[in-house]
Image (tube, rainbow, N blue to C red):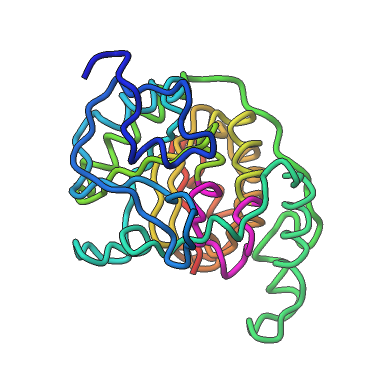
Amino acid sequence: MNSEAPLPAELRDLFADGGANRSLPVALPPGRPVFAEDAEAGDRPALWLSDRPAPAGLWARLRAEHARTGLWPLLLDALDDDEEDYRPWANGEVAPGEMTAPDGHDAAALLADWWTQHTAEDPEDGLNPEERRAVTAPYGETWPGLAPARPVRTDPEHAADGLAEQLLAGHASMRLGLVAADRGADAVTAVGWTGPMNYIDDTAELSAVLRDWEVRFGARVVGVGFATLVLSVASPPATREEALAVAAEHFALCPDNVWQAEEPHTLAAYADRLVDDHSWVFWWD
């Protein structure tokens, strides 16, 4: 495929403007556009999905051509690896029409509000006030604010490319998804992913936080599963103190990362695992 080849029709349909002035200098494996299961006549596909596992190296090539294609690549995992029902992707278990725009949300305000919700008294968790405060020590119920931005330690795009290859090496069944999005942080909203729905109804709120992490930590969206998200991180916390502040943001966004992690289920123990960690994984139960 030559460098000026226009997008094929199945990819142009992902764009509201029909993919004007877009080209695809990278050959794709066999695949198909996927519509949301509640799509109506005239709706655009939510994503393009490869029929088989993603070839090694292709994610990085597509990421490098994002400015030309307007398509952000995702390595997609599923609830199971059944080829006919690769949930939530192959069956269109997504809801792009139900999401707002990331521009309408403030990351700092969202994280502060979620922190308040997750540290509030909950009769169902069986914790007394002292035990509950111990989970998020040293902050307790007090939101510590955003963690400071980290100095750039490696190229964010190089870190993302490396993580993509690591993911494929560890889980070779992951398929390739392409989403019409201006940046990786927005791809989860554009595709209508509902993985965090037990905590976050509008994925645009998640995208607002991811946008902020792109800037402060050089984070990039690489992998998405049924209810999991994998980010590459170019500038992770380098000390335990820095990691505690970042861990507070992770807890606000995805409390299951702490509540259902390896024991002890505390912010401090979780923070220890974040020091110099160039990949962040989130799982919403």
Q: Is residue 31 magenta?
A: no
**Quadrant in which the N terminus appears:** top left
195 relative to 174 in the view: left or right = right
Q: What residue is at 46 percent from the left and 19 percent from the top?
A: 155
* Residue occupying the far top of the picture: 3
Judging depth in this view, the residue of 16 and 107 nearest the camera is 16
- Tell me the chief SS of the magenta region: loop
Q: Where does residue 97 sit, x and y in percent of width and height?
A: 58, 57
Q: Where does residue 263 sit, x and y in percent of width and height?
A: 47, 66
Please tell me whether residue 130 is drawn above or below residue 138 in the rendered image: below
146 relative to 226 in the view: left or right = right
- Magenta residues? 188-205
Q: What residue is at 33 percent from the left and 41 percent from the top?
A: 10
Instruction: Mark yes or no: residue 74 visible.
Output: yes
Judging depth in this view, the residue of 154 and 200 nearest the camera is 200
Q: What residue is at 31 percent from the left and 59 percent from the top?
A: 90
Please tell me whether residue 146 is drawn above or below residue 224 in the rendered image: above
211 relative to 285 in the view: left or right = right
